[in-house]
Image (tube, rainbow, N blue to C red):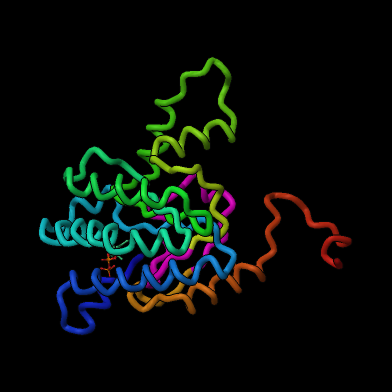
Amino acid sequence: MDGNGRWARARGLPRTAGHREGAKAVRSVVEAAPDLGITTLTLYAFSADNWQRPAAEVRTLMELFERFLHSERDKCIDNGVLLNIIGRRDRFEPRLLRAIRRAEAATAGGRNLHLRIAVDYSARQALIDAAGLHQSPEPLDVDSYTELLNRAVNSRPAAPDVDLLIRTSGEQRLSDFLLWECAYAELSFTDCLWPDFDGAELERAVAEFHRRERRFGRVVEARELAS
Ligand code: FPP
């Protein structure tokens, strides 16, 4: 969800104003997702490296996350959205941790959308943590490692591979996000700053995704192409 800072700067506002506006975009995108056939949506809200930002910005972001968990809980229940925070949990304030646990428990029955919000997330750390969870004498394979990775980041339920990765604000990097899960992800880049991103932007990206030919390393037979 990049571009909050630039959105604010363009209006002469502090960066935190951009983050507040960004939280509104989250609501719009979450509302639009199920009708677009999206069953799992992961939003990158705060990377493990984001702790290095100024303390006041980090505090505002943590407050925004906590407020979001309180304010959106009932709406998520009504709309069948299962809310799930993925990433590390040992560096949060106790009250944020309590809000996470409450929101996850309250929305656990959601069946329309698995909404994962990545907070204090690092894909590389997750890969290390998943390796540390491996105890079985059986050799690892893709499925068993994926399961460990889901456990390592507290993804409940486990999430499937990423089909479409959308990066906003003109950035074209992976930034330590879902490195394993994006093995065959289609990539979509937009100049749109996150606070301006909404359901209509998501629909455009999904429409473009459906026009892509996904081969997963195989050759597509002429017969298949014709059908
Ligand atoms: C990156 O853009 C954005 C973040 C580090 C924070 C994302 C947070 C939100 C969208 C708000 C709250 C989210 C929830 C789920 C309630 P940037 O700040 O680095 O922007 P810039 O690249 O323009 O400087």
Q: Quadrant of the N terminus?
A: bottom left
Residue 126 on image: x %, y %: 39, 39
x and y percent of residue 63 in the render? 18, 59
**Residue drawn at (86%, 67%) of the image:** 226
Which is nearer the eye, 49 or 71? 71
Can you give x and y, in whole percent of width and height, for residue 26 in the image? 37, 68
Q: Please indicate whether residue 72 sits to the left or right of residue 223 in the image.
A: left
Image quadrant where one finds the C terminus: bottom right
Which residue appears farthest toward the top when viewing the image?
Answer: 137
* Residue sitting farthest toward the left: 56
* Residue 55 lies in the magenta-colored region: no
Q: Decide: is 43 above or below 226.
A: above
Q: Is residue 156 above or below residue 148?
A: below
Quadrant observed for ligand 1 in the rendered image: bottom left
Between 81 and 187, the one lying in front of the other is 81
> Observer-nearest residue: 148 or 192?
148
For the point 23% across and 83% down, which residue is it? 10
**Magenta residues (range):** 166-188
